[in-house]
Image (tube, rainbow, N blue to C red):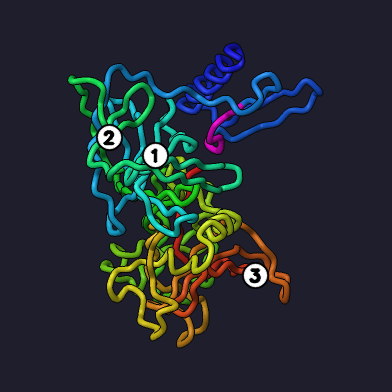
Amino acid sequence: MRKLYTTLIAVIMTLTAIAQTTPTTMKVNLSNGISQTFNIADIADVTFESEEWGGEVMPPTPTVQGVVEIEIPEITSYSDSKVYKVMLGETKIAEICLEYINTLDAQKMVIYPTDTYGKAILTKGVSLSDGGSVVWNESANTVTYTAGTNSPAQQVYYENGKFVWEPNADELEASEVVADKIQDNRGLLEKNSYGIVKIGTQYWMAENLKAKFYRDGSAITNIQSSQIDSWKNTTAGAYHPFADDTDFETLYGEIYNAYAFKDSRGLAPQGWDIPELSDYSTLKSYLGASSGNKMKSTVLMDWNDSGNTDYTPTDLSGFSANAAGCFLPLSQGDGGDTYLGSRTYFWTKTTGTDSTFGTPGYMYVGLTNVTKALFIATEPRDATFGHYIRCIRK
């Protein structure tokens, strides 16, 4: 067991070192003569399984001496990030999430210990409202919540690898609790940050992508919403804010054509990805009934009143989607930016073929003010449509 674990650590450290130098791929030669090449940027983690061990080898939790005091932050539906990291010096020792627990149909503040790579150990969550346990099955994306008997915590203490309500020591070490955000720097000209939300076992951006540059620092072409023919005819990546309005740009991010995320220069922030259609299917399945309502922002007037309370946003998931509209590459008078206040659509990188015309395209998902559930398309859209993008953590 120790040998297996040591091997895992060595492989991870080697991959980390390689990723910081020139090589971008890793080639694995199997004993049967078959070789397989992987892009290092696509490798999220490496695990080994052993019949002797009986399962996945997990990294250890960071070594913490003494008792650490953790002040619980105030996280609400309006917080820009619903995930906070607990830092002891330069080491992340825990993660606090405001997240939706589907078995309760409610939000809970949950704290998780983290492993030596800063990843939350989802089988060891503790509810901060009562000390109950929150245990995730990552492969099934399911949760088991067992109620506790503690009073709601204003602070907890990390002691011997566990969270306790009362410390067994007089001398306490203070931690720093800060919002966990994506820091997305693209060359010298663009620096963005994005909040994060945990939904089930997935981690999503809590707001729409707003990059105007590719990850290598080169500019994405800006084609204004009024330039419908230019947008329809380009085969390069393009973006614009709704109605070319900087206020909408601040609130909603950018509308992109599909060529933008197809570009090899990279659109998603480092460590994040354009979701597959299956990622949204997993999200919808976890949220269950009224999945769309649980994803819609509750900001006043963000979604036009449909006159039916069945469609009232709750944003229980923390996804906080705005009714930010879309771009339709249709003829003048019919096309351009539309549906502000009533719909929004998101691209996926999953390809498909139109069943009627046989043309290729990309799958998408959407929310409207007259549907309770997240809409998942069964037919693709042409790459010249304009939709928003939410990234998912690799």
- Residue 329: where, in percent of width, then height? 51, 76
- Residue 282: where, in percent of width, then height? 57, 55
Dot 2 surroundings within 10 Å: few (below 14), some, or many (20 or more)?
many
Displayed quadrant of residue 25? top right
Dot 1 surroundings within 10 Å: few (below 14), some, or many (20 or more)?
many
Dot 3 surroundings within 10 Å: few (below 14), some, or many (20 or more)?
some
Q: Which residue is mark 1?
A: 126
Mark 2 touches mark 1? (CB < 8 Å): yes
Residue type at mark 3?
Glu
Q: Earlier in the sequence, mark 3 or mark 2?
A: 2
Q: Which residue is mark 3?
A: 379
Most prominent secondary structure in the magenta stretch?
Answer: loop
Label for residue 346? Answer: none
Q: Which residue is mark 2?
A: 156
Residue type at mark 1?
Val
Q: Residue at x 34, y 47 (%)?
A: 109
- Residue 13: where, in percent of width, then height? 50, 20
Q: How far, Cα to Cα, is label 3 from label 1?
A: 42 Å
Residue type at mark 2?
Val
The residue stretch that appears in magenta: 41-47
- For label 3, the SS is loop
Outermost residue toward the bottom in this view? 333
